[in-house]
Amino acid sequence: MQFNKDFVFGTATSSYQIEGAHNEDGRTPSIWDMFCDIDGRVFEKHNGDVACDHYHRFEEDIQHIKKLGVDTYRFSIAWPRIFPAKGEFNPAGMAFYKTLATRLREEGIKPAVTLYHWDLPMWAHEEGGWVNRDSVDWFLDYAKVCFDELDGIVDSWITHNEPWCAGFLGYHVGVHAPGHRDMNEAVRAVHHMLLSHGKAVELLKQELKSTTPIGITLNLSPVYAKTDSANDRLAQNNSDGYSNRWFLDPVFKGQYPVDMMNLFSKYVHSYDFIKPGDMETISTECDFFGINFYSRGLVEFSAANDFMTVAAYSDYDKTGMGWDIAPNEFKDLIRRLRNEYTDLPIIITENGAAYDDVLENGEVHDDKRIDYVKKHLTAVSDLNDEGMNIAGYYLWSLMDNFEWSFGYEKRFGILYIDFETQERVWKDSAKWYAGVIADHKAKHADSVEA
Ligand code: IFM
């Protein structure tokens, strides 16, 4: 695999998954604090109260990031630290991110900052959360403060991380906070997230005249039909509509897919929450497109399911999450995006794998993770040879962390965290990734001299 000189290597985390310090410096609870507290929602009732204690150990973590040699580090801001109550800005919460971004830059690491990685303040949830259209204004107030305070020290902005998870897993399937099971709510929540994305982009670019690149990150999963039958292809179409097109079409085409609007209309009695001008705002041009890629979907027809689709048996090798390892399908996905959706530079804002890592004599031999990442980085390299313009890659995750409803049971990190002692241990994958980056830099240093 090879990458051009400007290709950026990074690694990523998010606030609730690593920070801890849940009640310090004015932070108030988010929907995830609430969700973790409900019996049966999160593995063994784990929560983010302490997590990786990154809030107190960020200096040590920056040294690990520096040693990896990455160009950029992606993290998210905890909204309840910035606005612990409605309309109340908390400078102490902002100070943490100012210090973090400043220290990263001093060490030569570019901060890539996500505004929303799922930790909605409880005060916002109590007023209806994302289902309430006012959430767009609350988000804009929050985005404005972040832009005002941090824009000079942030190298790129991501408005939302994976609105499919926050919207559909949170308000339809109910396995993420706030744990609702209501499709009517879910489509409204997603609409308001996407609208707040578009408005934040307009705010940064048009009002604040900033040139800092900004984009959105979608989690996309190419879906395949089990057989070529008309029924299985219908299942594939619906599943693709639910997972991918419901987000891609508004962001890039300024419209929701009509077939899915019809399918959802059993639950969504009216689309009157879509106001004039909304779709233009949602499809406001960004500077890059962020994609989180982990796996593919394989589906077949099911009459027992409202959307007529159900996961089919797949014999692919799987990660510790039970997700198919599918680098070729990743290539299909990128080619499709280029054909049907966008010419924007693509950044892989997350890719990685969970495995059942074992710490033995201070070492973690996570060969399977290395293999997974190698396959996907090779795919990125191949795709760029085809001219697909993938500008960067962030490995998820810098460290083992709170994996949402799976708690600390699933480990995605390239640094192993001992959650008793908070010791950080480099897994073999971290050493390998650092080597890939060092080779890349050496190669391009040589080519400059030559
Ligand atoms: O841990 C998550 C992350 O928060 C969002 N993308 C997927 C990761 C792995 O499940």
Image (cartoon, rainbow, N blue to C red):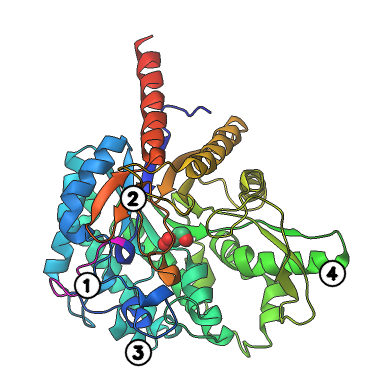
Dot 2 or dot 4: first in sequence order is 4
Quadrant observed for ligand 1 in the rendered image: bottom left
Residue range in magenta is: 18-26
Q: Is mark 2 within 8 Å of ligand 1?
A: no
Question: Of the residues tagged 1 and 3, which is closer to the observer?
Answer: 1
Whether residues under marks 2 and 1 lie with C-beta atoms below 8 angstroms apart, the answer is no
Element on which disc 2 rests? strand
Question: Of the residues tagged 2 and 1, which is closer to the observer?
Answer: 2
Q: CA distance from mark 4 to mark 1?
A: 48 Å
At label 4, which amino acid type do we have? Asn
Closer to the camera, 71 or 311? 311
Disc sitting over residue 416 in the figure:
2
Measured as percent of width and height from the top left, residue 120 is found at 34, 76
Dot 3 or dot 2: first in sequence order is 3
Element on which disc 1 rests? loop
Whether residues under marks 1 and 3 lie with C-beta atoms below 8 angstroms apart, the answer is no
Numbered-mark total: 4
Q: Is residue 198 left or right of residue 27?
A: right
Q: Which residue is mark 3?
A: 127
Element on which disc 4 rests? helix
Q: Which residue is mark 1?
A: 22
Closer to the camera, 395 or 334? 395
Q: Which residue is mark 4?
A: 231
User: What crowding class fits label 4: few (fewer than 14 Cα within 10 Å), some (14-19), or many (20 or more)?
Assistant: some
Disc sitting over residue 293 in the figure:
none
